[in-house]
Amino acid sequence: MNDAVRLQAECFQALALVIQAYQALLLAAREDAARYSHADKHYHVDLVIAQRLAAADPGNAEYQRDLSISRELLRDLDVQD
């Protein structure tokens, strides 16, 4: 095999590895997006519950704290987005 053919074969092998790595990154990004969507949905449900509890008993420090934590979790999730 001459040098040009060998170099071309090595380039194709390297390109195949790059494509494989890119496909793995895309798959990981899709999985992260699915996890984000799942977490976002549950954090919003948690926020609604915390809001209702805090509104029902405004003097309850635990309910107020839970509401604050729920809002903070959603804020953190939005920052990561």
Image: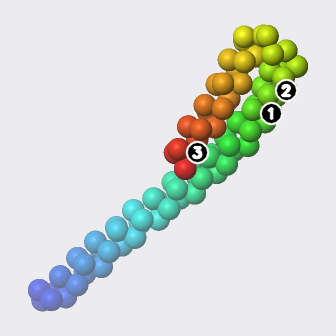
In the rendered structure, the answer to whether residue 12 lies left or right of residue 36 reads left
Q: From mark 3 to mark 2, how far is it between C-alphas?
A: 22 Å
Q: Position of residue 14 (x, y in %)?
A: 28, 72
The amino acid on which the numbered mark 1 sits, given as a three-letter code, is Val
Q: Residue at (59%, 38%) from the top-left corner?
A: 75
Which secondary structure lies at badge 3?
A: helix
Is residue 62 shown above or below 78? Answer: above
Which amino acid, by three-letter code, is at mark 3? Answer: Asp
Q: Quadrant of residue 76?
A: top right
Residue 30 x/y as whole percent: 57, 57
In the picture, the disc for residue 52 is 2
Foreground of the two, 44 or 54: 54
Q: Residue furthest front?
A: 59
- Disc 3 crowd, CA 10 A, few/some/many (<14, 14-19, 20+): few
Residue placed farthest to the right in the image? 56
**Mark 1 or mark 3: whose residue is earlier in sequence:** 1
| Residue type, numbered disc 2 | Arg
Residue that carries the numbered disc 1 in the rendered image: 48
**For residue 78, which numbered disc appears in the image?**
3
The residue that appears at 47% across and 65% down in the rendered structure is 23
Discs 2, 1 touching: Cβ within 8 Å: yes
State left or right for residue 56 relative to residue 33.
right
